[in-house]
Image: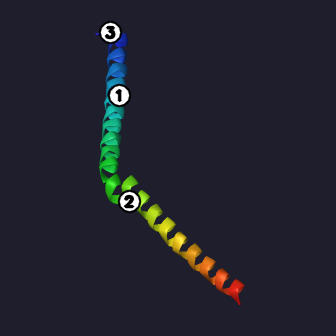
Amino acid sequence: MDDGQVLFNIIIGVAGLFGGWILNNISRSIERLDQDVREMPKIYVTKADYKDDIQHIKNTLDRIFDLIGELNSCKADK
């Protein structure tokens, strides 16, 4: 057997092993990313919840400003 052919086969084998290892790592990374994306609704606030919270804050601030306005008008009447 030719020494060049043996060397070529070894190089192709190592390249195939390395390529398979890389593809396996990419596949595992994609699976982890997919799992993380599926967990997002459990971790992060949804847009509807965010809008409800902002509306609640605005309503609370409106009540505070109304009370401040009433206090200022009472002080002005004295």
Give residue 61's mark: none
Distance CA(mark 3)–CA(mark 1): 26 Å
**Mark closer to the observer (3, 2):** 2
- Relative image position of residue 51 (x, y in whole percent): 43, 57
Q: Quadrant of the C terminus?
A: bottom right
Q: Is residue 23 above or below residue 47?
A: above
Q: Is residue 17 left or right of residue 54?
A: left
**Mark closer to the observer (1, 2):** 2
Q: Residue furthest front?
A: 77
Q: Disc 3 residue type?
A: Asp
Q: Residue furthest top?
A: 2
**23 or 53, which is in the foreground?**
53
Residues at marks 3 and 1 touching, judged by CB atoms closer than 8 Å: no
Residues at marks 3 and 2 touching, judged by CB atoms closer than 8 Å: no
Distance CA(mark 3)–CA(mark 2): 71 Å
- Relative image position of residue 62 (x, y in whole percent): 53, 70
> How many numbered marks have been drawn onto this rendered protein structure?
3
Give residue 49's mark: 2
Q: Disc 2 residue type?
A: Asp
Residue, disc 1: 19
Name the N-terminal-most of marks 3 and 1.
Answer: 3
Distance CA(mark 1)–CA(mark 2): 45 Å
Residue, disc 3: 2
Q: Is residue 77 left or right of residue 28?
A: right
**21 or 33, which is in the foreground?**
33
